Amino acid sequence: MYQVLYRKYRPRVFSDVVGQEHITETLSKEIETGKLSHAYLFTGSRGTGKTTCAKILSKAVNCQNPVNGNPCNECEICKGLDSGAILDVVEIDAASNNGVENIRDIREEINFTPASCKYRVYIIDEVHMLSIGAFNALLKTLEEPPAHVKFILATTEVHKLPVTIVSRCQRFDFRRVSPEAMKDRMEYIAEREDLILDEDAVSLISRISDGGMRDALSLLDQCIGHDRHVTSEIVCRVAGMTGKDHLFSLASTVSNKNSAEALSLISDLHASSCDMERLCSDMTNHFRNLMIVKTVKDSGSFLVCTKDELTQYKQQSETFTLETILQCISLLQECMANIKRGVNRRTEMEMTFIKLCTPTLNDDSEALLRRISELEIAIKTGAIKAVSEAPVQTSAPEDKPEITEAQIEEKSYREPQPTYEQAPEAANEEKAPQMPSEESSDEEQSIPWAEVLSELQKINAPLWGVLMDSQAVIRGDFVLIKSDNPTLNSFIRQPGCARNVKDSILRVTGKDYRLGIHNSQPAEKAAEAPKKDPLQNLISRARDMGVNVDVK
Ligand SMILES: Nc1ncnc2c1ncn2[C@@H]1O[C@H](COP(=O)(O)OP(=O)(O)O)[C@@H](O)[C@H]1O
Ligand SMILES: [Mg+2]
Ligand SMILES: [Zn+2]
């Protein structure tokens, strides 16, 4: 019958226990010299060797021919304890025997001498689970135990033990097993089991199991089920770490400021029944990884991922500033808190990504830091020119029209957008940028916009959502949209989105209009912006101080 690896390779002597030398050396010395305590406390996270060491110790103290403080595993006592024929070592699971009566039973029993062994040993596992009454009963027992009794208490949660118990035991803190120690042990096992372990597979297993040897060996066991040559791909598959593509794609919508794409990805994931809470936590972890890759030189050892993924993280982290990554983590954590409070998960995720893709929507300090760092990069790369000497503006204001942030956006949105055409008033922009609509001679006509929108709803629901509160007018060949939704820009840049709007207009009016943004709208917004937008405030304060922000 197949025996799982972690049972088959439970160490039988102290020297086989890896990564806990500070404990095993002390214990074997105590056995050699006969200076034994009457009570031991083993603490530490799961799968680090507590039960294993308790078993070895209980055998060693009774072994007829101990070898360097280890049990011989050959004598009658060792064999009898292994097979269960000798009952003087008692293992109690406190999780299921936590009552005062269970401890009282022990107190009765210990008055009798052991049947075959020198010591009767009680191993009480998960000892933090005992009830208060049981702790009190145990305390009395620990105060004056008979010389032929030893206690070994084990727990993952030592802080839950009364200090009175802890102070009566010799305490040993088990460490998480280091990646190197795990590697040694896995390679030892691989040799005996005739396995091939890839180096990055081993390091991946040790990082996934986070210092827990039992988890590491269980994972290895599952991998062997697929193939006796264990590769990092197999480890990923078995550990359910496959398919990070959607995380990379979703993250890149943030660096591209493409909220339409973000919404459609979330919609696809939702349709394929991806849990939004899980997605939120995976996304947080993804940005954590990007943060680490961006800030730490040798980041490989901090991340749980394959080599290829590490390269991918490195590439993606180049597309973000650290400020943006920090803002993403913080907004995603907020999103998670809201999800936990029971709000609609999908809506929450959508809102979060709209915020992340549209940094101008936020005025918290993280969003501002992100925007400032993006401005700095824009200035460095020459996308925006910062001039430190203020031109003499008062004498000839019409020569150098002040350019508002809204118009910066306007420009950057028009120029790279071939599917999107310039509105007629754009020609007037240089002359009178603030009030182009009033100067325009064209008459504005109304358009049955609500009908257009309901056509649009049928073919592009996310875009309809963005335009829901918008208005529009016809001027000449153009339909000019009035909207103060800041995400409109990124939506309309989508290939297909402008097309969808034009198609809807065509269906309602029978005419193929060109599209434009109504200019009065952003100008009005810009006029009130300094009150609302701290970054805008900052820019105008900088101007007051003589720094002019100009656009190439
Ligand atoms: N330090 C270690 N060295 C070698 N193997 C270990 C170690 N810790 C745990 N293991 C493996 O994990 C299994 C479970 O360990 P165990 O001692 O029961 O952990 P716990 O600390 O949770 O009591 C063991 O059977 C053994 O195969
Ligand atoms: Mg245990
Ligand atoms: Zn023995």
Image (tube, grey):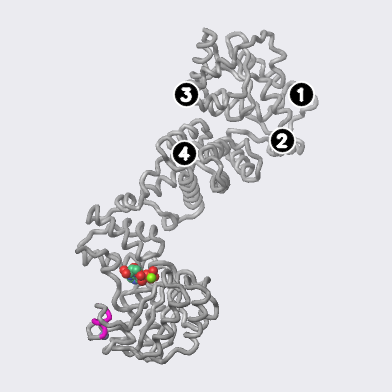
Q: Which residue is more in the foreground, 153 or 134?
A: 134
Q: Secondary structure at mark 1?
A: loop
- Could you classify mark 3 by the number of other residues whose Cα lies within 10 Å: few (under 14), some (14-19), or many (20 or more)? few
Quarter of the picture containing the N terminus is bottom left
The earlier-in-sequence mark between 1 and 3 is: 1
Camera sees residue 282 = yes
Q: Which residue is mark 1?
A: 397
In the image, which disc is placed on residue 250? 4
The earlier-in-sequence mark between 2 and 3 is: 3
Q: Amino acid at mark 1?
A: Pro
* Range covered by the magenta-colored residues: 77-82
Q: Which residue is more in the foreground, 483 or 542?
A: 483
Could you tell me residue 329's position as x and y percent?
A: 54, 47
Q: Are marks 1 and 3 in contact (CB under 8 Å)?
A: no
Q: What is the spatial separation of the Cα atoms under label 3 and label 4, in whole angstroms?
A: 18 Å
Q: Secondary structure at mark 2?
A: helix
Q: Is mark 4 within 8 Å of ligand 1?
A: no
Q: What is the spatial separation of the Cα atoms under label 1 and label 4, in whole angstroms?
A: 45 Å
- Could you classify mark 4 by the number of other residues whose Cα lies within 10 Å: few (under 14), some (14-19), or many (20 or more)? many
- Residue drawn where x is 70% and y is 28% of the image: 526
* Ligand 3 placement by image quarter: bottom left
Q: Amino acid at mark 2?
A: Lys
Q: Nearer the viewer, mark 1 or mark 4?
A: 4
The earlier-in-sequence mark between 1 and 2 is: 1
Q: Secondary structure at mark 4?
A: helix
Camera sees residue 48 = no
Q: Nearer the viewer, mark 1 or mark 2?
A: 2
Q: Nearer the viewer, mark 1 or mark 3?
A: 3
